[in-house]
Amino acid sequence: MSTNRFGVRTLAVLAVAGIAVLGTPTIASAHVSAQPAEFTQGGRATFAFRVPNERDNAGTIKIEVTLPQDTPLTSVRTRPLTGWKAEAVKGKLDKPVTIAGKEITEAFTSITWTAEPGTKIGVNEYQEFYVALGTLPEKDTLLLPTKQTYENGEVVDWSQAAGADGKEPEHPAPALKLAAKKAGDDGHGGHGTTPAAGSTDTHQASAGSDQTARYLGGAGLAVGALGLGFGVGAILRSRRKA
């Protein structure tokens, strides 16, 4: 009888563990990040700044992204988001830069999303701010330092680059990984590229960020099935002994 009870308890504990894994929502990261984050040099990138609220006593009301000036971006488009005002600022460069054989004297310097009255990213919430950028520079990584402002006045500066050892810093900047353009690639298709903002391809832009959740869901299902198997086996063994 005691073995039978042990088998039932084992089944219950493992089943609950599997359900807990399946039912736990996941966020790709605990800091501001770009989702997805891999694109092609010389092409365009449509992605979202994913911003989780990390404070339990204040909501996020402003996001400000600083754009690079050494490899300036000449095209910036934001996707409308209810309750938020987006502003892309353009200005003259300190030094002209040549891109694709053309001299560039002005480019976008920043993007700011400001919450309208009554809107914020609340406790245990996150928001995604979609943007389309181009033309992407010919470099391995494009850092996009971001400041996150809370309603209590606190400002968190996500601007640190990863160290030489690849270790993530305390406040990492959102970054795009840029792969070299392949022969015959015009930069508008292939590795990591997505359509410009305003298109109906939102699902594709967020598919990569949901992949982790699918993997964890599958793992939870496997744990639940394993627990069920152990529990049933224990019950059958106890009955044969009886």
Image (cartoon, rainbow, N blue to C red):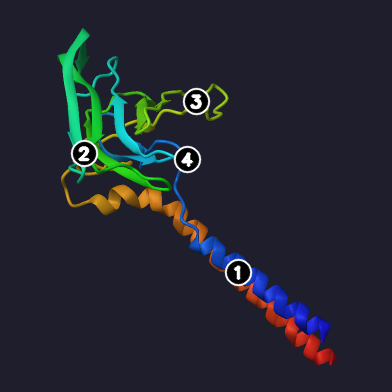
Q: Amino acid at mark 4?
A: Ala
Q: Which residue occupies the foreground of this view, 115 or 22?
A: 115
Q: Quadrant of residue 188?
A: top left
Question: Crowding at label 4, few (<14), some or many (≥20) Cα neighbours within 10 Å?
Answer: few
Q: Quadrant of the N terminus?
A: bottom right
- The correct choice, above or below, for 154 with respect to 208 in the image is above
Return the residue at label 2. 116
Q: Amino acid at mark 1?
A: Val
- The correct choice, above or below, for 23 with respect to 81 in the image is below
Return the residue at label 3. 162
Q: CA distance from mark 1 to mark 4?
A: 26 Å
List x then y, in percent, for residue 137: 29, 24
- Residue depicted at x 29% and y 14%: 70
Say which element carries label 4: loop
Q: Amino acid at mark 3?
A: Ala
* Residue 221 in view: yes
Image side of residue 230 versus residue 42, left or right: right
State which tag comes first along the sequence, 2 or 1: 1
Image side of residue 53 versus residue 86, left or right: right
Return the residue at label 4. 30
Q: CA distance from mark 3 to mark 1?
A: 38 Å
State which tag comes first along the sequence, 3 or 2: 2
Q: Amino acid at mark 2?
A: Glu
State which tag comes first along the sequence, 1 or 4: 1
State which tag comes first along the sequence, 4 or 3: 4
Q: Quadrant of the C terminus?
A: bottom right
Query: Is the Cβ of the residue at disc 2 closer than 8 Å to that at disc 4?
Result: no
Image side of residue 147 versus residue 104, left or right: right
